[in-house]
Image (cartoon, rainbow, N blue to C red):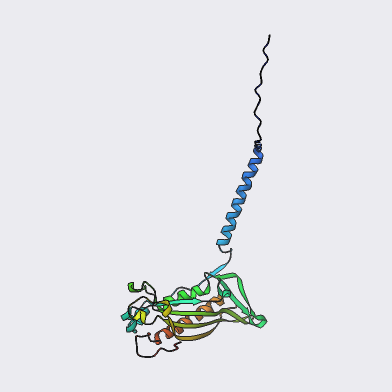
Amino acid sequence: MATPTRHTPHRATNERTAPCPAPRERTGQVWALALATLAGCALLLACASPAPGVALYDLGPVIYAPRQAEDATAQSPEAAGHGRRLSVRVLAPAWLDSPGIVYRLAYADVHRAQNYAGSRWVAAPALLVAQRLQIALDPGPLPARETAGPARVLQVDLDEFSQVFTSPEHSTALLRARLSLMDSGAAANAGGSPDPSTFRVIAQRSVNLEVPAPTPDAAGAVQGLHAAVEALVGAASDLVQKTPLSGASSAPARGKS
């Protein structure tokens, strides 16, 4: 007599196994992921790199003779004796805190500031002006005794840095700024580290520079503003050299506040 076959019952389970996608479906998913990754990389590169055809400008190479720094120190025995150096700080309004080259059409609406679409600075104007002033006024490294900071600070409040058109064919590079020379006072004279709370304004000057732009375009704006910055360097140098060090001379400081 044949023995009946016994079937072992399977245990009940609530787990369900997801069906495996078909080969074509898996291939489509891989391609979609790859395309999304490439699109993300392209977007990042587009944001990090300038658009094709955009012209980048700076203020040109620095042509100041290294001898100027040595002559300035030789003419100032107080600075040489105390190892006092100058630091430059340039502040600008929010609308100048970008690399855009700004122009205004005064004959249409002087209150509207616009940027050239195909040209821009390599950095915000405040950074370019600060670099130019620092190299011109005090290009050398700080002495070891002044690792805590400089004893004098030249603060420049940049109020205007644009090209103004009086007609479609005629424009002017306009630079307006306020110079404030600050001194750390007796702390630096005694050989100690300058205390920021002791800095005080010892001289001030307003600068309003207008230079004709050679051409009515972005290149003309750059050339005109470069000439204006060079004039600003001269005004700042004159202010620094003609203002006595605080506490180093019996002469009273000018513009003291």
Instruction: Give residue 116's position: percent from left, percent from top.
Output: 60, 72
Q: Nearer the viewer, residue 112 or 16?
A: 16
Q: Nearer the viewer, residue 256 or 31?
A: 256
Q: Is residue 180 left or right of residue 140?
A: right
Q: Residue 64: in sight, yes or no?
A: no
When the figure is inspected, residue 188 is found, relative to residue 3, above or below; the finding is below
Instruction: Give residue 228's position: percent from left, percent from top.
Output: 51, 81
Q: Residue 235: in sight, yes or no?
A: yes
Instruction: Give residue 84's position: percent from left, percent from top.
Output: 36, 79
When the figure is inspected, residue 131 is found, relative to residue 49, above or below; the finding is below
Q: Nearer the viewer, residue 119 or 79?
A: 79
Q: Is residue 159 left or right of residue 10?
A: left
Q: Which picture quadrant has residue 183?
A: bottom left
Instruction: Give residue 28's position: percent from left, percent from top.
Output: 65, 43
Residue at image coords 48%, 86%? 205
Residue at image coords 50%, 83%? 178
